């Protein structure tokens, strides 16, 4: 072997030796980093699921008892159905409200009322009349119709299929953010009552749920299918037909025969329903 070839051989061997030492150092460093990362990770037996959600002390044993696996929000096609079927379809779905600071509130819809449009003597759109106040009722399905009553309280409706038809949200079962709801209700409700509100009092009425979710007139004409501050998600469990009670609507005594029509729907046995109708429940079971 020539002297040149011998030198080249020595250089090649030296380079290979250096590369092997570098690879060993790199492998050792990666192993140490992996061990450090593993030490910081929680045990696989108790996976970290984040901070616990604020939940109420009582929850329905029938519906909306889990916050797991929230599906995507419900789109425009969900709202594009007649008022009666939409009022029933709302039951068991989850209303979500995102506040300005990012806090999210969730409540399962447990009570609704259907308003059928121009023919319905109890509807704000009776006779087909359109006003600046009720314009939302004539907009596309899924549009929020928020109006004020007694000069101080708000009620939230969602337009359905058919001009002037909508669904009133009457009561929710609070699922997430109960303490925030309690604070909002205590701040917004009228009167001098200072006691802390019970969970059952947070959303058991149309104006109560608007206070608890910070819903006011500024939400009128918003699209529930696209708005970033309020939307609807599919609930974990929907009530069976036998669990839904059809009863007369509340506070519409002026509407003649329409006051007695069974256009209010609620989930039987749910403690957050605003008004229970024992007679209607018996008729539903019969």
Image (tube, grey):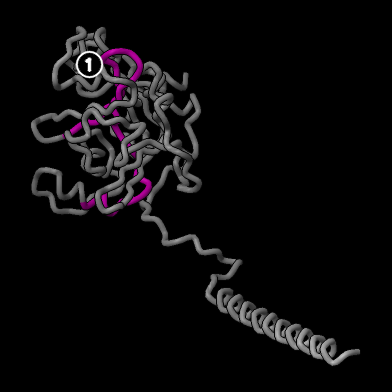
Instruction: Tell me the residue at 34%/17% (across/down).
Output: 262
**Residue 136 is inside the magenta segment:** no
Which residue sits at x=25%, y=19%?
A: 137
Judge whether residue 176 is colored magenta.
yes
Residue drawn at 56 percent across, 79 percent down = 36
Where residue 28 sits in the image (x, y, percent)?
66, 82
Query: For this view, does 211 lie left or right of residue 103?
Result: left
Is residue 248 visible in this depiction of the protein? no
Most distant residue in the bottom direction: 3
Residue 149 or 161: which is nearer the viewer?
161
* Residue 216, quarter of picture: top left
- Return the x and y of residue 107 as percentages of the image width and height: 35, 42
Is residue 118 visible in this depiction of the protein?
Answer: yes
Q: Is residue 267 above or below residue 261?
A: below
Q: Quadrant of the N terminus?
A: bottom right
Q: Which residue is at 18% across, 33% downward?
A: 154
Please indicate whether residue 4 sits to the left or right of residue 101 in the image. right
The span picked out in magenta is 154-183
Q: On the picture, is 278 further left or further right than 236? A: left
Determine the secondary structure under disc 1: loop
Up-down: is 97 above or below 21? above
Q: Crowding near pointer 1: few (<14 within 10 Å), some, many (20+)?
A: many
According to the image, label 1 marks what residue? 123
Along the line of sight, the residue nearer the viewer: 17 or 186: 17
The image quarter in which residue 84 lies: top left
């Amino acid at each position: 072997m020539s002297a040149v070839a011998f030198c080249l051989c020595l250089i090649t061997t030296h380079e290979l030796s250096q590369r092997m030492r570098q690879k060993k150092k790199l492998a050792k460093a990666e192993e140490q980093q992996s061990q450090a990362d593993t030490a910081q990770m929680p045990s696989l037996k108790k996976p970290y699921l984040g901070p616990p959600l604020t939940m109420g002390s009582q929850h329905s044993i029938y519906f909306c008892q889990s916050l797991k696996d929230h599906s995507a929000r419900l789109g425009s096609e969900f709202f594009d159905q007649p008022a009666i079927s939409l009022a029933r379809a709302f039951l068991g779905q989850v209303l979500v409200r995102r506040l300005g600071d990012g806090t999210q509130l969730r409540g399962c819809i447990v009570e609704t009322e259907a308003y059928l449009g121009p023919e319905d003597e109890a509807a704000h759109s009776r006779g087909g009349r359109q006003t600046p106040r009720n314009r939302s009722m004539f907009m596309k399905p899924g549009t929020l119709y928020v109006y004020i009553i007694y000069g101080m309280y708000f009620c939230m409706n969602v337009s359905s299929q058919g001009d002037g038809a909508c669904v009133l949200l009457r009561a929710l079962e609070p699922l997430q953010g109960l303490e925030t709801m309690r604070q909002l209700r205590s701040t917004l409700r009228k009167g001098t009552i200072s006691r802390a509100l019970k969970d059952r009092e947070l959303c058991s009425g149309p104006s109560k749920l608007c206070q608890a979710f910070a819903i006011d007139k500024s939400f009128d004409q918003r699209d529930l299918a696209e708005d970033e501050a309020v939307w609807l998600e599919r609930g974990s469990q929907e009530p069976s037909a036998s669990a839904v009670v059809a009863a007369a609507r509340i506070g519409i005594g002026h509407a003649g025969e329409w006051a007695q029509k069974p256009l209010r729907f609620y989930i039987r046995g749910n403690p957050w329903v605003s008004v229970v109708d024992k007679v209607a429940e018996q008729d539903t079971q019969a």
